[in-house]
């Protein structure tokens, strides 16, 4: 994921500073130098980085900080604020209103992902009940209209374009007029890709803008553009009234710092990011949670929102009860898989927890893991209720395994692998037996410690180390019960009632399961356990 490396380097620098016994000028300088290096390596413009460093030094005057001040916190907050400042121009972009016609024009360099993003933007709004329409004013690239037509047809979005007309201004005006008459509330105009050396094409873009009078011009930028970003973005801003930025290809492995510089150049906010080629790989962008995650400080509110999205409230106490009894059935595993898939990209959810970074999700593992989960679920669909609800491995005899394999159309060895995985997870989850379920009122320190102890047994050792051992985990649990995060978000509402608090715990359990399954590879000893169990059941691979 773009910027994951940058995030990793910055959070390591902060961690190193936190490990120092005394924070003096040297420790602060070392930390800032480390962060500066990371930002420059990620292609953030030099001037931005230098300004940021100067500002932090101005804010954090160690001599002026009286004893008793939490210097670490003040430095962290200053870095957080400065990074937010780079990404936040301080004024929101124009926001179209549902039911009221708005024209939105997309501009950007060749191949930045405009056409794909136009459709994603239209589809995003269509799902929310809008009536969007697409106009293809890209007469430069052969095939652009076909691409838009194909995307629009797939998403059932009306479109307008021409194979013969070569004047983009004319097409844009005709398209906008037609869709205004059809009462579309979001008319999106796609334009040709161009770069700042192409004066004629820039003039043409200006004419399209003048003729269609867009309410908002969106600059689409590929996250891998690098140092050229600032100048290019500025050139677009000087020709048309760019009001917002969308950064694409954030799923790649580019450095991504150039994209941060583009915001500074256009003085416009990033409103969405593209995270893949598919229509729904598109996310709303919010500066503070993004920076907080980038710095490994998590995004509790985002995490809680996710929980509420995926785990039905009425199922939570029951699941927690089952886990505390140590009965981990295949059905529980199935239900947890469903929730994990609903949570979306796990690396992203992962970075919402303080102390974690997206860097921990190895390249390509995400999609591979999701495919694995889906495969396991298909196999479980061929099982009987008795099998799904049992914790007795003897039920799975050779003939049943062959039947399941036939039923789901997968080789026997795949079913064996899934059962071995189940066994491994059941072993991990048996350590949750006796988990204390929070009752009325605030989570007490005692139950927090009890739960932290249970959790620590379930966490893969590498991960426990990453969050600072048992102490780090206790802090994490404490944060669950406290009210505010780095961004000043108050999310105490999520943790006040006993049910909701239990839900946080349930989801944290889900999450740990996902982490065990997706991020940390199986160890041989675990697999041997599965094999031994398979041998006990009297069949061979
Ligand atoms: N991985 C990934 N690929 C993307 C994303 N957005 C766009 N693409 C791909 O980038 C390539 C270029 O996208 P287009 O939408 O054709 O770009 P364009 O800016 O319209 O191109 P021009 O009209 O030539 O300027 C296509 O292969 C897209 O599938 C994204 O967020 N992630």
Image (cartoon, rainbow, N blue to C red):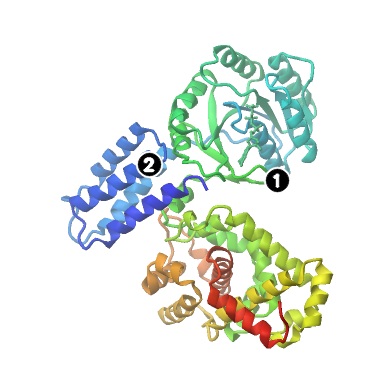
**Mark 1: which secondary structure?**
loop
Residue found at the very far front of the displayed protein:
540
Q: Position of residue 403 (x, y in %)?
A: 83, 76
Q: Nearer the viewer, residue 316 or 407?
A: 407
Left or right of 497 in this view: 173: right
Q: Residue at x 45, y 60 (%)?
A: 356
- Pick whichever, 292 or 482, lies toward us: 292
Within-10-Å neighbours for mark 2: few <14, some 14–19, many 20+: many
Q: Residues within 10 Å of mark 1 (few under 14, many from 20)?
A: few
Work out whether residue 195 or residue 434 is closer to the camera in this orientation and state it. Answer: 195
Residue 407 appears in view:
yes
Reading the image, the residue beneath label 2 is: 39
Tell me: 278 left or right of 502. right
Separation (CA) of disc 1 from disc 2 = 37 Å
Is disc 1's CB within 8 Å of ligand 1?
no
Q: At x 73% / y 26%, what residue is drawn?
A: 143
Image quadrant where one finds the C terminus: bottom right
Q: Which residue matches tag 1?
A: 128
User: Where residue 82 sits in the image (x, y, percent)?
Assistant: 36, 43
Give coordinates of residue 395: x percent, y percent: 75, 86
If you read the primary sequence from the N terminus, does the residue marked by circle 1 or circle 2 appear first? 2
Coordinates of residue 172 in the picture (x, y in percent): 71, 20
Q: Residue at x 17, y 50 (%)?
A: 64
Q: Is residue 312 visible?
A: no
- The picture quadrant where one finds residue 103 is top right
Q: Is residue 57 left or right of residue 462?
A: left
Give left or right: position of 410 versus 100. right
Q: Please, what secondary structure does the residue beneath circle 2 have?
A: helix
* 50 to 374, vertically: above or below: above
């Amino acid at each position: 994921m773009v910027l994951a490396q940058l995030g990793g380097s910055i959070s390591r620098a902060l961690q190193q500073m936190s490990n120092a016994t005394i924070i003096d000028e040297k420790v602060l300088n070392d930390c800032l130098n480390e962060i500066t290096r990371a930002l420059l390596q990620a292609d953030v413009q030099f001037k931005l980085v230098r300004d940021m460093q100067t500002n932090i030094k101005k804010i954090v005057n160690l001599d002026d900080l009286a004893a008793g001040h939490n210097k670490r916190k003040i430095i962290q907050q200053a870095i957080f604020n400065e990074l937010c400042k780079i990404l936040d121009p301080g004024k929101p972009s124009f926001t179209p209103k549902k039911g009221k016609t708005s024209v939105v024009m997309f501009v950007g360099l060749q191949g930045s992902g405009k056409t794909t993003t136009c459709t994603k933007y239209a589809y995003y709004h269509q799902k929310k009940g809008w009536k969007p329409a697409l106009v293809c004013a890209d007469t430069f690239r052969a095939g652009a209209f076909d691409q838009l037509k194909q995307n629009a047809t797939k998403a059932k979005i009306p479109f307008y374009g021409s194979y013969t007309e070569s004047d983009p201004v004319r097409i844009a005006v005709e398209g906008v007029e037609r869709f205004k008459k059809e009462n579309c509330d979001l008319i999106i105009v796609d334009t040709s890709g161009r770069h700042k050396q192409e004066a004629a094409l820039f003039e043409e873009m200006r004419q399209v803008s003048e003729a269609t009078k867009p309410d908002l011009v969106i600059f689409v930028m590929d996250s891998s553009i690098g140092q050229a970003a600032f100048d290019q973005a500025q050139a677009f801003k000087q020709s048309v009234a760019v009001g917002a930025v969308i950064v694409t290809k954030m799923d790649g492995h580019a450095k991504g710092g150039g994209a941060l510089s583009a915001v500074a150049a256009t003085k416009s906010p990033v409103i969405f990011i593209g995270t893949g080629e598919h229509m729904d790989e598109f996310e709303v962008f919010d500066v503070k949670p993004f920076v907080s995650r980038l710095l490994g400080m998590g995004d509790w509110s985002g995490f809680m929102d996710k929980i509420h999205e995926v785990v039905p409230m009425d199922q939570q106490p029951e699941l927690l009860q089952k886990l505390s009894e140590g009965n981990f059935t295949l059905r529980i595993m199935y239900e947890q898989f469903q929730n994990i898939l609903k949570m979306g990209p796990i690396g992203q959810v992962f970075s919402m927890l303080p102390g974690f970074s997206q860097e921990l999700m190895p390249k390509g593992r995400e999609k591979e893991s999701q495919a694995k989960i889906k495969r396991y679920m298909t196999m479980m669909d061929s099982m009987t209720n008795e099998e799904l609800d049992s914790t007795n491995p003897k039920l799975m005899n050779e003939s049943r395994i062959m039947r399941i394999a036939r039923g789901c159309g997968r080789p026997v060895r795949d079913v064996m692998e899934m059962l071995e995985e189940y066994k491994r997870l059941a072993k991990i989850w048996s350590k949750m037996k006796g988990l204390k379920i929070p009752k009325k009122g605030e989570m007490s320190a005692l139950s927090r410690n009890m739960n932290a102890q249970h959790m620590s047994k379930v966490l893969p050792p590498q991960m426990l180390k990453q969050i600072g051992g048992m102490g780090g985990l206790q802090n994490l649990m404490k944060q669950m019960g406290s009210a505010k995060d780095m961004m000043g978000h108050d999310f105490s509402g999520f943790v006040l009632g006993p049910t909701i608090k239990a839900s946080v715990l349930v989801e944290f359990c889900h999450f740990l399961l996902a982490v065990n399954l997706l991020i940390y590879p199986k160890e041989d000893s675990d697999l041997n356990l599965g094999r031994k169990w398979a041998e006990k059941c009297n069949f061979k691979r």
